[in-house]
Image (cartoon, helix red, strand yellow):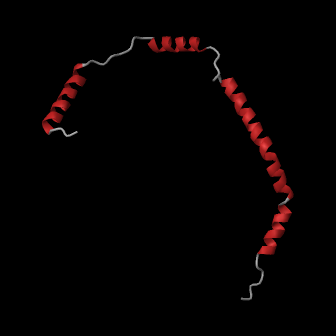
Amino acid sequence: MNTSPDQLDQLFRAARLASSSQPDVVPPFGLETRVLAAWRSSRGATLWDTGVLVRGLAVAILLVLASSWPAFEKQTNSDSENLQFADSSVQSDFSQ
């Protein structure tokens, strides 16, 4: 979309006039308090309650720990085997 500079200047002038002609609107005193009170009273007990989310996070952590336990158990038992394999694969002849 190509616009001429005159059209763009007209648009900028109209925007300046529109923004300067409207006064700042201040909400009535206590509106925030009333809105928050209405929101809290309408909330009730939902699925996304904080207690439910904390319990779900705890269960998820327990599931991750339980599912990774065999991997940690196998790793601690086979450390000596891994070290023996690493020692046998490293060249120890430095006479070259």
Residue 88 location (% of width, % of height): 81, 74
Left or right: 57, with 1 as reference point: right
Q: Quadrant of residue 87?
A: bottom right
Q: Nearer the viewer, residue 33 or 54?
A: 54
Disc count in the image? 0
Residue 1 location (% of width, % of height): 22, 39
Q: Residue furthest bottom?
A: 96
As displayed, is residue 71 above or below residue 28? below
As displayed, is residue 96 above or below residue 77? below
* Quadrant location of the C terminus in the rendered image: bottom right
- What residue is rendered at 18% in x and 35% in y? 8
As displayed, is residue 23 above or below residue 94? above
- What residue is rendered at 49% in x and 11% in y? 34
- What residue is rendered at 74% in x and 88% in y? 95
Left or right: 41, with 22 as reference point: right
Q: Quadrant of residue 23?
A: top left
Residue 39 location (% of width, % of height): 54, 14
